[in-house]
Amino acid sequence: MAKIQRTLVVLKPDSVGRSIVGEIISRFERTGLHIAAMKMLQPSKDFFHYHYETIGTMISRRGEKAFNRQLNTMMKMPVIAIIFEWVEAVEYVRKLVGSTEPKAAAPGTIRWDYAHMSFDYADEVDIGVPNLVHASGSVEEAEKEIAHRFKKEEIFDYKPLHHAFTR
């Protein structure tokens, strides 16, 4: 049975720096997802290490060099963390965002529309891939990522007006 879920989306420094945050958020909201929490923050290296290794195992999978590239990209300016909520939100948000590698993202996804870099090029110029957003990969990952970024009292539980016509 389909369930109401919460998922984490992080608008990365390239979204913030290009001033396309509003456009990206509106794409999620237009689909029926609603915001349960949102805040801007400038995380530390330790914060990102926990996110990328303890939760995401990036260093174990891709190595310290890949992590350092990503860390440098993520620490350039603030990020915006958002909890979106609605039916099967985790999978739905992943579809809206598109493939992690912008070059491989499907037409119409956020990464296809706003990011155009391949992993090969990013490696060649020694940078993290500017792919605009992070989206939780699973329900379990979403729960861990949300707990890492938000206190319970920062998360709001409400039913948006456009959901009044659903069960």
Image (cartoon, helix red, strand yellow):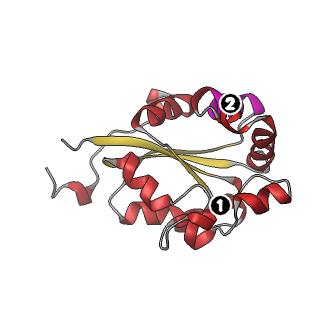
Measured as percent of width and height from the top left, residue 123 is found at: 80, 55
Q: Quadrant of residue 52?
A: top right
Task: Check disc 2 and report the residue beneath it.
Answer: 60
Query: Which image quadrant: the N terminus?
Result: top left
The residue lying at 77 percent from left, 33 percent from top is 45
- The crowd level at tag 1 (other Cα within 10 Å; few <14, some 14-19, many 20+) is many
Element under disc 2: helix
Is 68 included in the stretch rendered in magenta? no
Drawn side of residue 125 relative to residue 131, left or right: right
Q: Report the span colored magenta.
A: 45-53
Q: CA distance from mark 2 to mark 1?
A: 27 Å
Measured as percent of width and height from the top left, residue 24 is found at: 53, 64
Residue 46, above or below 65:
above
Measured as percent of width and height from the top left, residue 64 is found at: 79, 34
Drawn side of residue 135 relative to residue 162, left or right: right
Residue 56, above or below 19:
above
- The crowd level at tag 2 (other Cα within 10 Å; few <14, some 14-19, many 20+) is few
The residue lying at 51 percent from left, 60 percent from top is 98
Residue 48, above or below 89:
above
The residue lying at 62 percent from left, 31 percent from top is 57
Measured as percent of width and height from the top left, residue 3 is found at: 25, 41
Is 50 included in the stretch rendered in magenta? yes
Can residue 128 be seen at all in this image of the molecule?
A: yes
Can residue 34 be seen at all in this image of the molecule?
A: no
Asked whether 48 or 39 is in front, the reply is: 48
Q: Amino acid at mark 1?
A: Ser
Q: Is there CB contact under 8 Å for labels 2 and 1? A: no
